[in-house]
Amino acid sequence: MIGVMEHLCYEDRLRELGLVSLEKRRLRGDLIAAFQYLKGTYRKAGEGLFVRECSDRTRGNGLKLKEGRFRLDVRKKFFTVRVVRHWHRLPREAVAAPSLEVFKARLDGALGNLV
């Protein structure tokens, strides 16, 4: 690491270097993978991975996912559980993106407000 920054905390180092935190990078990767599963990029592997919510009362984006309920705390770390809460917070424009590249661009704009 650069000797000048060794006294700075993690957030200040990231800001100084113009980088994004590890938590936000992981979330971005998870949401991109969820988009690919939902749009059918991974047909065989993604069948039944996410369950879409069938409801007319949707606020925010129109593609709501069903959130599972589990008794074990271990399952809170599963990919499908971890992504659903953040997916519901995405704006309609990001979720309804026609391609992966458009989704990534819109996701980057939305992530500034999410975390």
Image: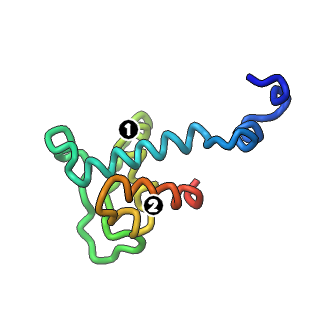
User: Observer-nearest residue: 71 or 58?
Assistant: 58
Q: How many marks?
A: 2
Q: Which element carries disc 2, helix, strand or loop?
A: helix
Question: How far apart are the alpha carbons under marks 1 and 2?
Answer: 25 Å
Q: Residue sitting at 73 percent across and 41 percent down?
A: 11
In the image, which is nearer the foreground, mark 1 or mark 2? 2
Above or below, comparing residue 26 to residue 53 in the picture: above
Which residue is under mark 2?
106
Q: Residue furthest bottom?
A: 56
Q: Which mark is residue 58?
A: none
**Does 89 sit left or right of 16 as displayed?**
left
Q: Can residue 66 be seen in the rendering of this structure? A: yes
Q: Which mark is residue 78?
A: 1
Q: Residue sitting at 43 percent across and 37 percent down?
A: 77
In the image, what residue type sits under mark 2? Arg
Relative image position of residue 8 (x, y in whole percent): 82, 34
Q: Which element carries disc 1, helix, strand or loop?
A: loop
Pointer 1: residues within 10 angstroms few (<14), some, or many (20+)?
few
Q: Quadrant of residue 4?
A: top right
Relative image position of residue 93 (x, y in whole percent): 40, 69
In the image, what residue type sits under mark 1? Phe
Q: Residue sitting at 38 percent across and 69 percent down?
A: 61
Q: Can residue 85 be seen in the rendering of this structure? A: no
Q: Are marks 1 and 2 in contact (CB under 8 Å)?
A: no
Q: Quadrant of residue 62?
A: bottom left
